[in-house]
Image (cartoon, rainbow, N blue to C red):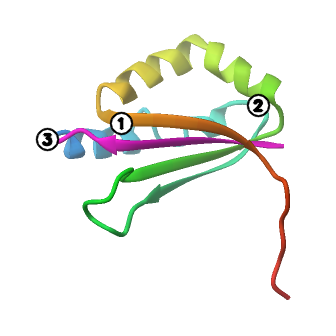
């Protein structure tokens, strides 16, 4: 399993449009694709910090992620998303170690 992580800030003046997008066309976008296990969206609790938002998507494989990125509907949604955000960076992560408190 891998984790695709997307970090970004919402463009000034675009927060309302961004929120509308995440409740409409962008809602659960990732879950529509095979190979996606889950996704999480985080918001910074420190108002002025950057990035303001982080999306983490758990995907079964790099192949599954590549298929998502090549999908025309995903590309269209990504284009809209990028019109609302700035300071975008991403990572593809794999688990090295994990632990659980018992």
Residue 36 occupies which quadrant of the picture?
Answer: top right
**Residue carrying label 3:** 13
Categorize mark 2 by other alpha carbons within 10 Å: few (<14), some (14-19), many (20+): few
Categorize mark 3 by other alpha carbons within 10 Å: few (<14), some (14-19), many (20+): few
Callout 1–callout 3 Cβ contact below 8 Å: no
**Residue carrying label 2:** 34
Relative image position of residue 51 (x, y in whole percent): 39, 50
Residue nearest the viewer, comparing 18 with 101: 101
Q: What's the residue at 83%, 38% (across, down)?
A: 60
Residue nearest the viewer, comparing 90 with 65: 90
Relative image position of residue 8 (x, y in whole percent): 40, 42
Disc 1 and disc 3: Cα gap in Å? Answer: 15 Å
- Which label sits in the foreground, 2 or 1? 1
Instruction: Name the image quarter holding the N terminus.
Output: top right
Q: What's the residue at 37%, 69% (across, down)?
A: 45
Count the numbered circles shown. Answer: 3
Relative image position of residue 93 (x, y in whole percent): 72, 43
């Amino acid at each position: 399993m891998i984790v695709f992580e997307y970090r970004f800030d919402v463009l000034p003046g675009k927060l309302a449009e961004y929120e509308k997008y995440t409740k409409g066309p962008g809602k659960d976008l990732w879950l529509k694709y095979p190979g996606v296990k889950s996704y999480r969206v985080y918001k910074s609790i420190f108002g002025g910090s950057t990035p303001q938002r982080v999306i983490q998507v758990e995907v079964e494989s790099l192949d599954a992620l590549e298929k998502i990125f090549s999908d025309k509907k995903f590309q269209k949604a990504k284009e809209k998303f990028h019109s609302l955000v700035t300071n975008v960076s991403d990572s593809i992560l794999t688990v090295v170690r994990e632990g659980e408190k018992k």
